Amino acid sequence: MQLKTFASRECLIEALTDELERSFTRAAEADYAVILSGGNTPLPAYQRLAALSAPASPHLHLTLSDERMVPADDPRCNARYLKPVTAALQLPSNRFLPVNTAFPLEEAARAFDAGIRSWMQRSIVFELAVLGLGPDGHTASLFSADDVRRGTGACAISVRRPDPPDRVSLTPTVFSITRRILILAAGEEKAPMIQTLLHNPRSIPCGLAIQKAPSVELWTDQPVEKSF
């Protein structure tokens, strides 16, 4: 795991904005996919990207790491925050794969799984995933070691939560074939879990979920010891 620290959250957001702009518009000879997370940390980057006018690469495909099972116009819906981005990129609707939250939970998970598998069958390269790190150690909507294990052999799973809403999440199956993963961890509340991810990654869902990924970078605005 590569560690990259930034002087402030603003510096992290600027770097993420630049990274995603390059990923969305880069020259490519084959279809590729970028996975984006919800949550508060990347939201300012998405807002800045929505103000750009550069069209997307004709090979770009976008999807989400996870989604809350809420209506599409609900403020908690991750896809809602990406609509201005896909509009600015002039990305055709058939190259953005959301979770259909109008379906019942299990049906939504199966449909999302089928969509990801279709991309794999078409040899779409999973180029980049931007994931978060929760203060409880989760990533995407994989909140427990059991959630991670249930993802074995699946591309997407349903995740029932004690408090609504339930979720649909991508799995380690997808992360293991994604060429590059960025874990975003900003804010003092993330500092303890950053240390855990660096020193004892298999003790938390995030570390378990990404352990087979080819390349992982941890981006943070917190000072941490570079142990490896």
Image (cartoon, rainbow, N blue to C red):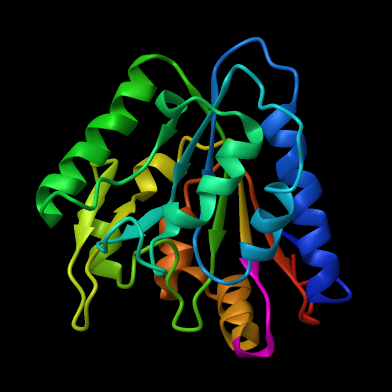
Q: Is residue 86 left or right of residue 102?
A: right
Q: Residue 2: image x %, image y %? A: 73, 57
Quadrant in which residue 40 is drawn:
bottom right
Residue stretch rendered in magenta on the structure? 184-189
Q: Which residue lies furthest to the top in this view?
A: 29
Q: In this view, does 40 lie above or below 167?
A: below
The residue sitting at 35% across, 66% down in the picture is 74
Residue 31 visible to the viewer: yes
Q: Residue 90: image x %, image y %? A: 60, 29
Q: In this view, does 36 lie above or below 117?
A: below
The residue sitting at 51% across, 56% down in the picture is 81
Name the foreground residue: 153 vs 22.
Answer: 22
Q: In this view, does 175 lie to the left or right of 150?
A: right
Q: Residue 98: image x %, image y %? A: 36, 42
The quadrant of the rendering that contains the C terminus is: bottom right
Number of on-image labels: 0
As for residue 85 lying within the magenta part, the answer is no
Q: Residue 26: image x %, image y %? A: 75, 25
Residue 36 visible to the viewer: no
Name the foreground residue: 168 vs 149.
Answer: 168
Quadrant in which residue 119 is drawn:
top left
Q: Is residue 153 above or below residue 131?
A: above
The residue sitting at 43% across, 52% down in the picture is 79
